[in-house]
Image (cartoon, helix red, strand yellow):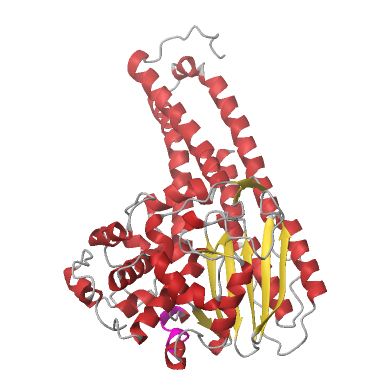
């Protein structure tokens, strides 16, 4: 029974990662904002999303701004502040490009030219990793080669120094491997070249020139931050967003849909704050279709980057050939949401903004139903383990009548089942995430990014392990003595 439940859990969890293909651009069809509102409301209802903030851009104008649902204590609006996750990388890349244009750095120079003590575990590779490699995620570094868990208040310098223990998972410059810490190095590099905090540089170089007055790279300075939500058993659950001080430039800038529309307009017009030549460099894809802080696909017809914090989700999509763009901010950040509800919502908005029919709302999994399924599975496991613990009281008496081999198997199965569950789960996760998988950081992340799945894993593995330890203890201390807690089982 436990094995069947485990298989069901794995099926439910990993089948959610399959998503339908994106819609294709349609040209200059008028955007139907009535249909857009209805489609967003339907997706929010399907998945139980608390709040969404939207901006739609056409040409050099923001043609639509609207908030949906709640920001926690008040309705969501286009002026509500939210974390934008990895969309922050595009700001970091833009500032690096500006510094290059000002002659402060060479994009193709080794990182050691600016941070002499920069090191990874491979001494030769340390000298060959360039600024450009970090920008394109082609340094050869990945989460799979860096298993250190840094404290949230670690500095940018501490993050860079932790790379001294990082091992290459691909030769330098040969493979796209998305790696947050690479952008942490760039954040530190910005501070070293300018002599100022990263937040101050971003404000002067990007936010102020674009009039993004309610955006900040200093999360302590927010004044109207939306409440963030994770998910427990299908229901939105408020949770304080963890902030890693060393990773602001990779994932913790705060903005609004209205401000991000200003940013998207500037990017849609070719960069705005830099020369056309450098803008072209930013939007030229390298390995993995990744430019400088942006993914570039469909031969440049779609330029985009998402963001996935523990309690927030972001999509900023630019369509230069169609002259349109949109910003989608969500105050729900459960990991399954990032791959399912957030993606379905993005595809819906993309289709309508480009004049296509959106996918039917019934298409694809519902994160709300997935959560309910996880809850039912946990309830079933609790009932099963309660039953097993109740009958554990008579185990020593029953063990007296077992052969040595059967007794050994009865004890071993209590350890084999949870071990098999963990091996299958983490091997599947590793297969999905590839070079972004690192065991200890993944386990640490589960508590925040997948709390209900984390609970499921604990309930699916700990009780059996505890029963196995109790059986071993009884065998070691009393053999198969008769137990007087209850009559022997016939």
Residue 460's x, y, as percent?
A: 53, 39
Confirm whether residue 203 shows in the render: yes
Identity of the residue drawn at 65% across and 87% down: 59
Identity of the residue drawn at 37% across and 50% down: 153
> Could you tell whether 264 is left or right of 89 in the image?
right
> Could you tell whether 208 is left or right of 187 in the image?
right
Identity of the residue drawn at 56% across and 51% down: 10
Q: Point out the image quarter for the C terminus.
A: top right
Q: Nearer the viewer, residue 1 or 89?
A: 89
Q: Is residue 138 above or below residue 373?
A: below
Q: Is residue 451 above or below residue 189?
A: above
Confirm whether residue 17 shows in the render: no
Identity of the residue drawn at 51% across and 48% down: 448
Q: Is residue 112 magenta?
A: no
Residue at the far top: name it.
Answer: 484
Span of residues in magenta: 281-288
Q: Quadrant of residue 188?
A: bottom left
Residue at the far right: name it.
Answer: 34
Residue 50's x, y, as percent?
A: 69, 54
Q: Is residue 283 magenta?
A: yes
């Amino acid at each position: 029974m436990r094995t069947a439940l485990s298989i069901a859990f794995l099926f439910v969890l990993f089948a959610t990662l399959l998503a339908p293909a994106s819609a294709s651009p349609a040209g200059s069809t008028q955007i139907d904002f009535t249909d857009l509102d209805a489609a967003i409301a339907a997706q929010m209802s399907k998945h139980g999303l608390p709040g969404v903030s939207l901006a739609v851009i056409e040409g050099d104008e923001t043609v639509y701004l609207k908030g949906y649902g709640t920001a926690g204590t008040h309705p969501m609006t286009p002026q509500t502040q939210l974390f934008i996750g990895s969309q922050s990388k595009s700001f970091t890349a833009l500032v690096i490009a500006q510094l290059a244009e000002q002659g402060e750095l060479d994009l193709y120079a080794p990182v050691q030219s600016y941070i002499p003590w920069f090191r990874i575990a491979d001494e030769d590779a340390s000298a060959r990793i360039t600024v450009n490699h970090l920008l394109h995620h082609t340094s050869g570094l990945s989460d799979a080669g860096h298993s250190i868990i840094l404290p949230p208040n670690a500095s940018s310098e501490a993050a860079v120094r932790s790379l001294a223990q990082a091992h290459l998972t691909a030769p330098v410059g040969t493979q796209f491997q998305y790696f947050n810490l690479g952008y942490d190095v760039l954040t530190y590099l910005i501070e070293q070249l300018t002599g100022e905090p990263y937040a101050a540089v971003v404000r002067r170089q990007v936010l102020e020139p674009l009039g993004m007055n309610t955006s900040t790279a200093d999360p302590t300075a927010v004044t109207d931050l939306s409440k963030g939500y994770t998910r427990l058993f299908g229901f939105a659950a408020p949770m304080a967003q963890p902030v890693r001080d060393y990773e602001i430039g990779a994932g913790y800038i705060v903005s609004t849909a209205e401000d991000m529309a200003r940013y998207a307009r500037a990017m849609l017009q070719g960069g705005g704050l830099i020369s056309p030549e450098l803008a072209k460099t930013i939007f030229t894809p390298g390995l993995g279709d990744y430019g400088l802080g942006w993914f570039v696909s469909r031969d440049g017809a779609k330029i985009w980057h998402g963001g996935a914090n523990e309690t927030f989700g972001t999509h900023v999509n630019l369509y230069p050939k169609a002259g349109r763009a949109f910003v989608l901010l969500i105050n729900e950040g459960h990991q399954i949401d990032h791959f399912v509800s957030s993606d379905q919502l993005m595809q819906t908005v993309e289709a309508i903004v480009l004049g296509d029919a959106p996918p039917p709302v019934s298409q694809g999994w519902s994160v709300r139903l997935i959560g309910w399924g996880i809850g039912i599975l946990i309830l079933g496991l609790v009932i099963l383990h309660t039953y097993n613990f109740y009958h554990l009281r008579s185990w020593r008496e029953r063990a007296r009548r077992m052969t040595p081999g059967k007794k050994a198997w009865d004890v071993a199965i209590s350890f084999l089942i949870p071990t098999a569950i963990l091996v299958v789960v983490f091997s599947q996760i590793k297969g999905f995430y590839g070079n972004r998988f690192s065991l200890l950081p993944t386990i640490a992340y589960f508590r925040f990014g997948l709390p209900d799945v984390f609970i499921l894993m604990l309930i699916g593995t700990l009780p059996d392990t505890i029963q196995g330890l109790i059986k071993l203890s009884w065998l070691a201390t009393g053999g198969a003595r008769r137990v007087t807690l209850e009559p022997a089982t016939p």
